[in-house]
Amino acid sequence: MRILVMNPNTTASMTASIRATATAVAAPGTEILATEPLWGPESIEGHFEGYLSAAAVLDRLATLDAPFDALVMAGFGEPGREGAQELLDVPVLDITESAAQMALMLGHAYGIVTTLDRAVPQIRDRLLTAGLLQRCAGVRGTGLGVLELEEDPERTVAVIIETARQVVRDGAEVICLGCGGMAGLQERVAAELGAPVVDGVAAAVKFAEAVVGLGLATSTQRSFAPPRPKVIGSWPLSTHLGLAGAGDRGRQQGSARSNDFSRKTSGI
């Protein structure tokens, strides 16, 4: 089984940490591929950058020449997941819903610790759309920007722990780490908190293994039917920018096709 994990920003070091977390939890026989878009924002902290990233991720998927059995989208609260479900024939999971679904199996109410406070409404909107907001006790920002998470790891963990304690006081029994850049920190936070801590990347990988193992995939009956054939000007964009080779269009097992990959990533 091969699972592709997509970092929605263009920061390769974050892709590497996400890959490490996914690999650590993957079952024997599961191969983890990880990449990021060929263009787009270095971090996502708002709706503008989120929608740019969604287009860049779909562009990357439409020109990627690497077969895989499931896709994990490693952006917390970011748009674009539904587009990927239409584009691909394989299961598509995002870390926001996967983290929340896992948390709901472990406690009555869960809470989320994220980066900047401005991300809170975006995450709450995502949970509302997914039908997961009712049992969310709270979403709190640490005040750390996405790129700041990597600058001082000890400070990052300390701030996450303190924010998580506030979310527990809000009524949460389980904490979700609300950013792909927090991948791999769950054990340290849980040890200090005394409550379960769910990392969305890890949860999504395990759910992906289960869905693929059961032989299931996204329904194409209605909401996520394949895109209707039509001309899309300058698509894929990366081809016109000279970043990737022209790929075949349409839904294919694993992904659409391309001849080129990001030089910042490894393994694919």
Image (cartoon, rainbow, N blue to C red):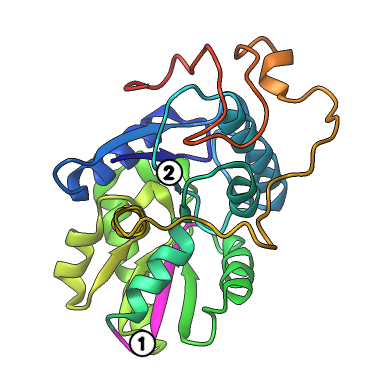
SS for dot 1: helix
Label 1 Cα crowd, 10 Å radius (few <14 / some 14-19 / many 20+): few
Q: To which residue does mark 2 refer?
A: 148
Q: Which residues are magenta?
A: 107-115
Return the disc, 1 or 2, that comes first in the chain's sequence.
Answer: 2
- Return the mark for residue 206: none
Question: Which of the 4 image quarters holds residue 103?
Answer: bottom left
- The location of residue 129, given as percent across then percent down, is 63, 72
Q: To which residue does mark 1 refer?
A: 169
SS for dot 2: helix
Name the kind of residue labelled 2 in the image: Glu
Label 2 Cα crowd, 10 Å radius (few <14 / some 14-19 / many 20+): some
Whether residue 192 is in magenta: the answer is no
- Which residue is drawn at the image coordinates 41% and 77% (left, top)? 111
Q: Residue 256 or 268: which is nearer the viewer? A: 256
- Which residue is drawn at the image coordinates 53% and 12% (left, top)? 259
